[in-house]
Image: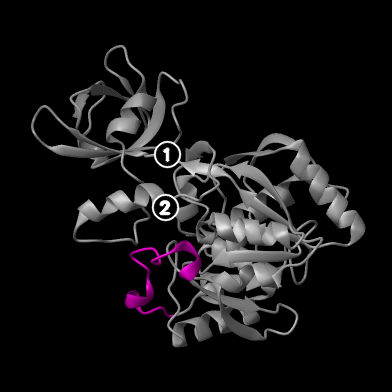
Amino acid sequence: MMTLDDFDYLLPPDLIAQFPAPARDRSRLMVLERSSGAVKHARFSDFPGLLGEGDLLVLNDTRVFPARLMARRDTGGMVEIFLLNYPAGASEVRCMAKPARKVREGESLTLEDGSRIVVRRDGDNLWVRMASAGDLSSVLERVGRVPLPPYIQRENRDLDRMDMERYQTVFARHPGAVAAPTAGLHFDARALAGMESRGVKIRYLTLHVGPGTFRPVRTKDIRDHRMDTEWFNIPEATAEAVNTAKGRGERVIAVGTTVVRTLESSVSRGRALPGEGTTDLFIYPGKNGPGGRFGIVDALLTNFHLPRSTLLMLVCAFAGTEHTIAAYGEAVREGYRFYSYGDAMFIV
């Protein structure tokens, strides 16, 4: 049995990054050799130099949409509405509310621009729609707020304006995520151009990160945990590039755990399949990695993740639990910044 204690580590709260680095490529970079556990320290600006001709870099081009809405009840109380899906023309969207217990079936709420939404209850599920003719997507563009992770706690919420840019990758294209694919936040146009000049191939896929990325594991045995389902799309050009690289023995480098889950969900007989789909793939030690295998991914760029989280379990599957936890311990001792706005780790 694998328990949560196997994926725990001590993290001083002051190492949880509350703000992004001054520039995207100013973050630190730990390089972890998964075969030996050896660690080197670098800067993210060094990352292009760690890649070479023939390497294939795969990035997630999902775009975070402003999923948080502040609404006022007719009684005067405030309610935070968190949309779980991008509206994209839908007349009704599933959501969460805080405080949920006070929101009644059919209640009308007023948003910050004066428009109104109506809440529908379906058992434990909540849905919202516009109270009159109108496009919920347009409302989000006016008054929607960035859905920052719960561990980012700032006293001055006016500073959240910066997140409209910085909690978004420079290559974000397709709106639908409620959390950023944070490994991609370190890249700027210069880094991408620098890699291409070295002969690195760059391709994209889309996985819309859902709120389940923050859902804690509560089962005694982690293998009993069930992941939330997330939508993905792998373009034909990306699948072709992946399959060509594997056929030539070249490295496929995943930027982020979302890319790992998408590619490993798509593999069939050693080949990546193009197209749309959904995945609830849960990658943990023994299922993949040491004691198992990864069918596509050869190297991984990722941020430092929460203790006991499914994201950390995926990294442990890829690099080995002992090597990963030891590397995290060194990152703490060296003062690395953790989580979404934190530093990066390159596992080779």
Q: Quadrant of the N terminus?
A: bottom right
**In this view of the protein, which residue sits in the foreground, 228 or 251?**
251
Instruction: Please tell me whether the stretch drawn in magenta is mainly helix, strand or loop.
Output: loop
84 left or right of 293? left
In the image, residue 168 above or below residue 110: below
In the orientation shown, which residue stands out farthest toward the top?
133
In the image, residue 265 above or below residue 325: above
In the image, residue 339 above or below residue 73: below
From the image, tell me which residue sits under label 2. Answer: 167
Could you tell me which secondary element the residue under label 1 belongs to?
A: loop
Asked if the magenta segment contains residue 63, the reply would be no
From the image, tell me which residue sits under label 1. Answer: 65
Residue 62 horizontal/vertical position (percent): 55, 43
Could you tell me which secondary element the residue under label 2 belongs to?
A: loop
Residue 332 horizontal/vertical position (percent): 45, 83
Residue segment shown in magenta: 10-26
Q: Is residue 251 visible?
A: yes
Q: Residue at x 55, y 70 (%)?
A: 44
Q: Residue at x 41, y 27 (%)?
A: 93
Residue 310 horizontal/vertical position (percent): 55, 61
